[in-house]
């Protein structure tokens, strides 16, 4: 097992994430369309990924002043996609309709090597400067 920080990204434009946990480790609050503004330490993850790895994610939505009542707290078990031996930080991604994805990566969401499709990254985009840097072989 190796230590990892827990961070997140809120891909929703209408709800804030009041708080969340991945396994037993807590993550920061997330405003709409925000993320990686901070992380919490520490969780433990296996140094080597193995098929069938799953983790429980629990989260609450924030109440908006004068707005509608937020959805109830949520809980889901998700699979963890393969990660490299360099491990990295745990990143929880929150989407509309209570959808959640968890990835473990050394890279930030704008990096070309971040393990997500461009569609799943929205509203964030891969940095064109980092793509050029990678093409030149400097990102190894």
Image (tube, rainbow, N blue to C red):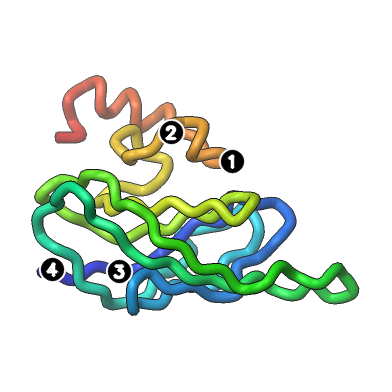
- Image location (x, y in percent) of residue 46: 13, 63
Residue 80 relative to residue 101: left or right: left
Q: Position of residue 20 (x, y in %)?
A: 49, 72
Q: Earlier in the sequence, mark 4 or mark 1?
A: 4
Label 1 crowd (10 A; few <14 / some 14-19 / many >=20)? few
Give me the C-alpha separation between circle 3 and circle 1: 23 Å
Local secondary structure at mark 3 = strand
Q: Indicate the position of residue 84 as horizontal and vertical percent values.
A: 15, 45
Q: CA distance from mark 4 to mark 3?
A: 10 Å
Helix, strand, or loop for circle 2?
loop
Eyeballing the image, is 119 above or below 59? above
The residue mark sitting in front, 4 or 1, is 4
Q: Are marks 4 and 1 in contact (CB under 8 Å)?
A: no
Which residue is at the front of the view, 83 or 39? Answer: 83
Between residue 10 and residue 125, name the one nearer to us.
Answer: 10
Nearer to me, 65 or 23: 23
Residue occupying image coordinates x 64% and y 51%:
97
- Residue position marked by numbered label 2 in the rendering: 127
Label 2 vs label 3: CA separation? 23 Å
Quadrant of residue 31 within the rendered picture: bottom right
Label 3 neighbour load within 10 Å: few <14, some 14-19, many 20+: many
Q: Label 3 belongs to which residue?
A: 5
Compared to 71, does 116 lie above or below? above
In the rendered structure, find residue 2 and report the number of the disc placed on it: 4
- Foreground label between 4 and 2: 4
């Amino acid at each position: 097992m190796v230590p990892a920080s827990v961070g997140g990204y809120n891909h929703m434009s209408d709800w804030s994430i009041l708080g969340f946990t991945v396994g037993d480790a807590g993550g920061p609050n997330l405003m709409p369309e925000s993320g990686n503004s901070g992380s919490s330490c520490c969780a433990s993850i296996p140094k080597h990924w193995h098929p069938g790895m799953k983790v429980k994610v629990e989260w609450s939505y924030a109440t908006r002043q004068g707005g509608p009542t937020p959805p109830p707290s949520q809980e889901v078990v998700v699979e963890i996609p393969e990660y490299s031996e360099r491990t990295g930080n745990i990143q929880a991604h929150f989407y509309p309709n209570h959808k959640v994805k968890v990835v473990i990566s050394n890279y930030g969401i704008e990096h070309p090597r971040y393990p997500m499709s461009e569609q799943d990254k929205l509203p964030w985009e891969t940095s064109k400067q980092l793509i050029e840097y990678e093409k030149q072989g400097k990102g190894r």
